[in-house]
Amino acid sequence: MSPVSDATLADPPETGANWGAVVALSLGAFALVASEFMPVSILTPIASDLSISEGQAGQAISVSGAFAVITSLCLSAVTRRMDRKHVLLGLVALMLASGTLAALAPSFGVFLVGRALIGVAIGGFWSMSAAIAMRLVPERSVPRALAIFNGGNALATVVAAPLGSLLGGLFGWRMAFLCLIPVAGIAFLWLLARLPRMAPVQLTEGGTLFGLLKSPAISLGMLATALFFMGQFTLFTYLRPFLESVTGVAVSNLTAMLLMLGLAGFVGTIVIGKPLERALYPVLIAWPLLLAAVGLGLIAFGASLIGTAALMIGWGFLATSAPVGYWTWLARTLPDNAEAGGGLMVAIIQLSITLGASLGGLLYDAGGHVPAFGAGVVLLVFAGGAAGLARLRATV
């Protein structure tokens, strides 16, 4: 990889591993994901305090998602001559500004500006994640680094909603946002101290965002990624109404079951690193197929509380750890264009989640959980098939 400016900037030695910086990135990921989904559990008090409807308050999540997609597609080109350390620190600073604006917002408009800033931080942070991990640890350790990085994501999905609900109930919804600011501040200072200076790199031939898709192996890998996330969220988005109406889970037990799913996902991100180091493509093929089997199990045994609980553990383990596999694939397939590829992948993932949730909603309203979950299963099977085709075309 060739620097385009400032020859004094250098990557860390390939023989070493900067695990302190990796853990700091994981903390940053935790703060980002917790900030992104915090409004879900405090939507009602936000709407009441800002004198808006709950539907309008829900747009705070849509706004952050839209800005995440735009940023992921544009960041690499806009910052192509900047030290990557400075870019990353700038994104974390935006997270701090976002939390402050959201917590102190006197109006809905200011609140939305804060949510737009968190969207920019999310899109940029995730699009750079694989490229940064590749420059902090040796190649053989990249899957482990990405697993640690995604561990912050998994932990945030476990605690963000209940923590937001608890803090919002005790101290008000603004305090829920304010409590994340110190976490982001610690991540900023930690990254400032531990991240090395990292030169920008030139794109190789065909390294533009959509030029990458001219490669069959890359386009098939991105297709596998899109199908996986679309299939996952066609089913997962409607898991709560399924648990309440089909399994008959009481509201008092629902939080415990969802927490169990989240904890299983956290464990999954911890243990998947080693299998990915040894057998990347078998994992990319097997994980969607296993998740499809879990989906079939929910259709067949959804009325059983014990059976559904066991399947939920399996879903959490597989669904939360799988993204580590796709990011590892990106790092190995595009070692010289990881930032452009990361931006494209973030945009594809966000779009796939939206399409999956929309498809699942249409099917759930039309015929209940069976067609919605069935469509999710089919998409997951196709995701495993696309990964198999990508393996045949791969050169890694």
Image: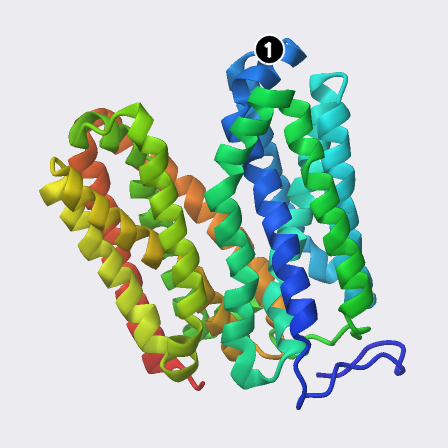
Is residue 328 something one can see in this rendering?
A: yes
Left or right: where 313 falls relative to 269: left
170 vs 265: above or below = above
Q: How many marks?
A: 1
The x, y position of residue 122, in whole percent, is: 63, 48
291 vs 392: above or below = above
Give the residue at mark 1. 48
Question: Residue 63 occupies which quadrant of the picture?
Answer: top right
How is the rendered protein coloured? Answer: rainbow
Is residue 62 something one can see in this rendering?
A: no
At horizontal 39% and vertical 84% (from top left) the residue drawn is 278
The x, y position of residue 49, in whole percent, is: 65, 12
Depth check, front residue: 187 or 2: 187
Q: Quadrant of the C terminus?
A: bottom left
Depth check, front residue: 306 or 241: 306
Q: Quadrant of the N terminus?
A: bottom right
At horizontal 62% and vertical 76% (from top left) the residue drawn is 134
Left or right: where 181 falls relative to 223: right
* Crowdedness near tag 1: few (<14), some (14–19) or many (≥20) residues, C-alpha within 10 Å: few
The x, y position of residue 173, in whole percent, is: 63, 23
Q: Which residue extends farthest front?
A: 170
The x, y position of residue 171, in whole percent, is: 64, 22
Question: Residue 234 occupies which quadrant of the picture?
Answer: top left
At horizontal 43% and vertical 86% (from top left) the residue drawn is 395
Looking at numbered disc 1 in the image, what kind of residue is underneath it?
Ser
Left or right: where 168 falls relative to 221: right
SS label for mark 1: helix
